[in-house]
Amino acid sequence: MTNIQILGIGCAKCKQLTENAEKAAQELGIEYRIEKVTDIAQIMSYGVMMTPALAVDGKVKLVGKVGTPEEIRALLS
């Protein structure tokens, strides 16, 4: 199972990133779990200083922007 973490405080961009990540994972047909990380200290522990950010299985893949479903699909495969 792929663990997808959305790092952010819950802003509109974070919500859009969540939707795009879900769409990308569904299009790939993979088993996944979305985890929203909203605690600033925990976000910083990933080395992220700008949100939203996307991590896959604990590894940061995208920082400071809302990736499109196509971009995220490439990061997940």
Image (tube, helix red, strand yellow):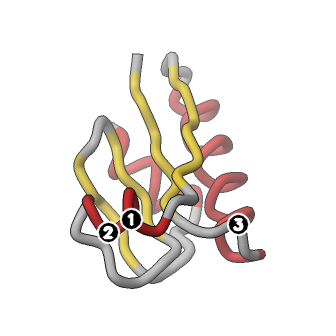
Q: Where is residue 59 shown, x and y percent of the image?
A: 23, 49
Determine contact: label 1, label 2, CB under 8 Å: yes
Determine contact: label 3, label 1, CB under 8 Å: no
What number is the disc on residue 41?
1
Query: Residue at point 36% right, 51% down?
Result: 55
Q: Considering the numbered disc 1 on the image, is that residue within a helix, a strand or a loop? A: helix
Q: Where is residue 56 shown, x and y percent of the image?
A: 34, 43
| Corner quadrant of residue 46 | bottom left
Q: Considering the numbered disc 2 on the image, is that residue within a helix, a strand or a loop? A: helix
Query: Residue at point 52% right, 52% down?
Result: 37
Q: Considering the numbered disc 3 on the image, is that residue within a helix, a strand or a loop? A: loop
Q: Callout 1: few (<14), some (14-19), or many (20+) C-alpha neighbours within 10 Å?
A: few
- Give the side of residue 62 with respect to residue 72, left or right: left
What number is the disc on residue 12?
none
Q: Which residue is mark 3?
A: 10
Q: Is residue 47 above or below residue 29?
A: below
- Give the side of residue 55 with respect to residue 7, left or right: left
Determine contact: label 3, label 2, CB under 8 Å: no
Q: Where is residue 63 shown, x and y percent of the image?
A: 37, 75
Q: Callout 2: few (<14), some (14-19), or many (20+) C-alpha neighbours within 10 Å?
A: few
Instruction: Using the image as rendered, state which of residue 37 and residue 24 is in the foreground.
Output: 37
Q: Nearer the viewer, mark 3 or mark 1?
A: 1
User: What's the residue type where badge 1 is placed?
Assistant: Ala
What number is the disc on residue 44?
2
User: What's the residue type where badge 2 is placed?
Assistant: Met
**C-alpha separation, residue under disc 3 versus residue under disc 2:** 15 Å
Instruction: Using the image as rendered, state which of residue 28 and residue 53 is in the foreground.
Output: 53
Q: Quadrant of the N terminus?
A: top left
Q: Nearer the viewer, mark 3 or mark 2?
A: 2
Q: Where is residue 32 shown, x and y percent of the image?
A: 51, 24
Instruction: Using the image as rendered, state which of residue 48 and residue 33 is in the foreground.
Output: 48
Query: Residue at point 46% right, 68% down?
Result: 40
